[in-house]
Amino acid sequence: MLDIQVVMHGNLRRFLPEGIASTHVRVAEGTTVRSVAQRFDAQDEVWLSAIDEVVVSMSEPLTRDATIDFFAILEGG
């Protein structure tokens, strides 16, 4: 099992309890970044994901303990 820190940026914090910024989850090796986002029902809101500060696709498999950052699309007006 891998220990993954999940960091939700911006309005994605609404997917974590009480709007906290990060949490830890345990997942099996080979779990995809998308699967981690799905645990929080956030997969449709994620615009960009990164593992240990390196941008990756949502289909990237996890192979080690890491930090996953999820970013929402930025909107302005």
Image (cartoon, rainbow, N blue to C red):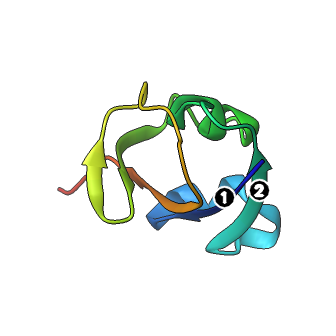
* Callout 2 amino acid: Val
Q: Residue furthest left?
A: 77
Q: Is residue 69 left or right of residue 34?
A: left
* Quadrant of the image occupied by residue 3: bottom right
In the drawing, what numbered circle is on residue 54?
none
Which label is found at residue 14? 1
Disc 2 to disc 1: CB gap under 8 Å: no
Above or below, 39 against 75 in this view is above
Q: Residues within 10 Å of mark 1 (few under 14, many from 20)?
A: some
Horizontal arrangement in the rendering, residue 47 relative to residue 67 (left or right): left
Instruction: Select label 2 or label 1 by which is in front.
Output: 2
Residue 40 can be seen in this image: yes
Q: Position of residue 23 (x, y in %)?
A: 72, 68
Please state the horizontal and vertical placement of residue 34, each as a whole percent of the image.
Answer: 54, 30
> Which mark is first along the chain, 1 or 2?
1
Give the distance between the C-alpha atoms of the residues marked 2 and 1, in whole angstroms. Answer: 17 Å
Query: Which residue is disc 2 drawn over?
Result: 25
Q: Residue at x 66, y 58 (%)?
A: 14
The answer to which of 14 and 27 lies nearer the viewer is 27
Residue at 74% x, 37% y: name it.
28
Q: Residue at x 60, y 30 (%)?
A: 30
